[in-house]
Image (tube, helix red, strand yellow):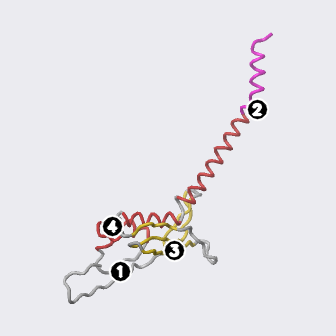
Amino acid sequence: RNPLAGLIMKSRISVPRLALRWATAAVIIAALVVTSAIVANRTLFSAEHAVQSLHQHLLAGEGAEALGLLGAKVPTGDAVALDGEVLTRTQAGITDFEAQKAETPENNPDIRTVVAKYKADGVDKESTYTLRSTGKSWLFFDQWAFEPVTLPTVKVKANTVNEVSV
């Protein structure tokens, strides 16, 4: 008998099994990649995450980053409360911040509205943010931009006192 005949026979029998194993592994890996992309798109690349990111920048006193996300128009005036320590202090009373699930208006599938619920000095409050889809990155991941707004202004006039807390 030829000693190679048994080896050849074994390799012919195991080739289909090996191919099946590789194919099964490839299908499992592809399914994991697609599932991971879907989960990442629904969490890290969601409109809700954009609102949460804005809140994190505000908490950290990162006004430039927050304004960059908002795309907000800054009115003329003293912008001292828009960055740094003053901005951080304005956020000190904000607790229990939670961005709710984004909703899509019936008339425009590229728009999402996100309601953020929070407490301001213990009082329940909410803010609504509108975001627009700006396309996708890497073919899978949604990109969102806040609809441009103009920041509100407050005029304080105190003729009878030397100091005012705002």
Residue 55 pos. (x, y %):
42, 66
Q: Which residues are magenta?
A: 1-18
- Residue 16 is one of the magenta-drawn residues: yes
Q: Residue at the location (78% across, 16% down)?
A: 5
Q: Is residue 24 above or below residue 8?
A: below
Secondary structure of the residue carrying tag 1 is loop
CA gap between label 2 and label 3 equals 55 Å
Amino acid at circle 1: Pro
Q: Nearer the viewer, mark 3 or mark 1?
A: 3
Residue 88 has which mark?
4
Nearest to N terminus: mark 1 or mark 4: 1
Residue 158: image quadrant is: bottom left
Amino acid at circle 2: Pro
Foreground pick, 43 / 100: 100
CA gap between label 1 and label 4 equals 20 Å
Q: Is residue 143 above or below residue 34?
A: below
Outermost residue on the right side: it is 1
Residue 16 has which mark?
2
Q: Residue at the location (53% across, 68% down)?
A: 100
Quarter in which the N terminus is drawn: top right
Contact (CB < 8 A) between labels 2 and 1?
no
- Residue 125 is one of the magenta-drawn residues: no
Residue 17: image quadrant is: top right
Amino acid at circle 4: Thr
CA gap between label 2 and label 1 equals 71 Å
Which residue is tagged 3? 130
Which residue is tagged 1? 75
Secondary structure of the residue carrying tag 2 is helix
- Mark 1 crowd level (few <14, some 14–19, many ≥20, 10 Å Cα): few
Q: Nearer the viewer, mark 2 or mark 4?
A: 4
Foreground pick, 83 / 132: 83
